[in-house]
């Protein structure tokens, strides 16, 4: 799993306040529920794998971590496109 450290650091800094953060331009869906989805299934991506998350019109999003305070850290699966795969990016957080 590839993750951008800058998003993780921002999430950690904001998590204590229970603030929802979304990637710029995203319509964030960071609900406290998830199902099993396949991520990295585009051509040029790393090997497909199963993750807990959801798929909708803005893409596939998965839970990268749940901390001891039940804060869910969501990531966008950025596979596909002309360059194959790009780093998965921080999508948002939600205390559940």
Image: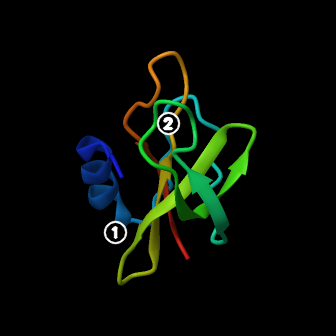
**CB within 8 Å, label 1 to label 2:** no
Please name the residue shown 28% across and 60% down the image.
12
Render colour scheme: rainbow
Q: Tell me if I can see residue 58 in this picture.
A: yes
Name the spot of residue 43 as percent of width and height, x first: 54, 31
- In this rendered view, identify the residue nearer to me: 94 or 85: 85
Give residue 16's mark: 1
**Whole-number angstrom distance, CA of label 1 to CA of label 2:** 27 Å
Figure disc tally: 2
Q: Residues within 10 Å of mark 1 (few under 14, many from 20)?
A: few
Furthest residue toward right = 57
Image location (x, y in percent) of residue 24: 50, 31
SS at badge 2:
loop
- Foreground of the two, 51 or 30: 51
Residue drawn at point x = 29 percent, y = 49 percent: 10
Q: Is disc 1 placed on a helix, strand or loop?
A: loop
Residue 28 sits above or below residue 94 on the image: above
- Which mark sits nearer the N-terminus, 1 or 2? 1
Q: Is residue 18 left or right of residue 9?
A: right
Closer to the eye: label 1 or 2: 2
Query: Is 35 on the left-hand or right-hand side of 24?
Result: right
Determine which residue is flagged by label 2.
78
Quadrant for the C terminus, please. Answer: bottom right
Disc 2 packing (10 Å; few <14; some 14–19; many ≥20): many
Towards the viewer: 40 or 88: 40
Which residue is at a point 54% across and 64% down the rendered structure image?
51
Q: Where is residue 28 drawn, in percent x and y?
A: 62, 46
Is residue 30 among the parts visible in the rendering? no
Taking the spot 75% from the left edge, 38% from the top edge, the residue there is: 57
* Residue 88 occupies quadrant: top left
Q: Position of residue 27 (x, y in %)?
A: 65, 39
């Amino acid at each position: 799993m590839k993750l951008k450290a800058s998003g993780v650091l921002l999430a950690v800094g904001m998590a204590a306040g229970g603030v929802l953060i979304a990637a710029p331009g995203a319509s964030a869906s960071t609900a406290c529920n998830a199902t099993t989805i396949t991520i990295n299934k585009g051509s040029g991506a790393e090997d497909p794998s199963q993750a807990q998350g959801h798929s909708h019109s803005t893409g596939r999003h998965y839970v990268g971590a749940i901390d001891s305070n039940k804060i869910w850290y969501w990531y966008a699966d950025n596979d596909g496109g002309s360059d194959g795969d790009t780093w998965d990016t921080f999508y948002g957080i939600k205390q559940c």
